[in-house]
Amino acid sequence: MIFETHAHYDDEQYNEDRENLLREIFSAGIDKIINVASTMESSRECIKLAEQYENIYAAVGVHPSEIDCIKGDTYEELRSMAAHRKVVAIGEIGLDYYWDKEKEVQERQKVEFIKQLDLARELDLPVIIHSRDAAADTMEILKNQPKRENPGIIHCYSYSVEMAREFIKMGWHIGVGGVVTFKNAKVLKEVVKEIPLERIVLETDCPYMAPEPHRGKRNSSIYIPHIVDKIAELKNVSGQEVEEVTYNNALRVYQMK
């Protein structure tokens, strides 16, 4: 069985065939899916989707590039949504300096990131971290947070082996998706080789970043076996072992066992 730890099935790209696609996905051995928010509106939609499907769960939060949607009552609403029985994480939250290069915007991202980290700690929920071109600031903020036994996932990991080891020492899990199958993903492949399988979780970030041989197409959880196969190859283990270990890792992260 496969645990998909990061999907966006509320995205409009699935409006035409969402129900049929999810039926196909669950029939193909995908056992659980975390549908992850990026805005307040998508947080609400993630909960609605989780209410419709037994094996879909929700993460609520505001992506760093979407912080303009944060208003005066946002954190009270997030706290209320996080109490829902199907909400298992705060996310995706973090820093994104790829799109937002202005210092003022980056400082605001840090403020909202820390507020959402504080909320997750208050509610004892793991967090799903988005960090792009912001390695040093992400590490500094997370190191300054009170230590938690199970802080969450560094989603779509894109930094060095050394930084991955540092995150793991701090208790984090590393999210590995379709990028690991790309020919030019040398650093991520080295990360997967070097870190323990017990710290890796599977994800797609669908509808984005489909793995080879589907790169450039709309992504979905049905393509996760390509990610499993590549991780198995890199770590010289069976695909079954990758599925079993990552499944249990995800259960542990999301406090579902």
Image (spheres, grey):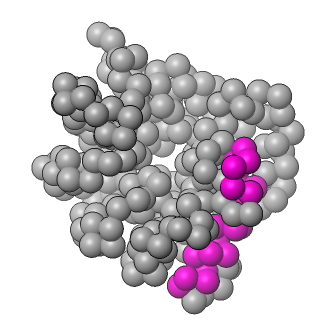
- In the rendered view, tell whether residue 82 sits above or below residue 198: above
Q: Residue at x 40, y 16 (%)?
A: 69
Residue 84 locus on image (x, y percent): 50, 30
**For residue 16, which quarter of the picture?**
top right
Residue at position x 69%, y 49% in the image: 216
Question: Left or right of 172: which side holds 48?
Answer: right
Residue that extends furthest to the bottom in the rendered view of this protein: 236
Along the line of sight, which residue is nearer the eye, 5 or 108? 108
Magenta segment's dominant SS is: helix
Q: Is residue 15 left or right of 36 when viewed as pictured? A: right
- x then y, percent, for residue 219: 70, 48
Image label count? 0
In the image, residue 68 above or below residue 186: above
Q: Give the residue at x 70% y 68%.
A: 226
Q: Whole-percent x and y of residue 1?
A: 70, 66
Query: Relative to the observer, which residue lies in front, 66 or 128?
Result: 66
Q: Which residue does the image show at 27% across and 66% down from the upper left?
A: 163
Numbered range of the magenta stretch: 214-235
Decide which of 100, 4 is in the foreground and name it: 100
Q: Residue furthest top?
A: 72
Residue found farthest to the left:
144
In magenta stretch: residue 82 = no
Q: Which corner quadrant of the image does residue 86 belong to?
A: top right
Asked whether the viewer can see residue 243, the reply is: no
**Residue 108: horizontal and vertical position, in percent?**
22, 26
Q: Is residue 194 above or below residue 101?
A: below
Q: Is residue 172 visible?
A: yes
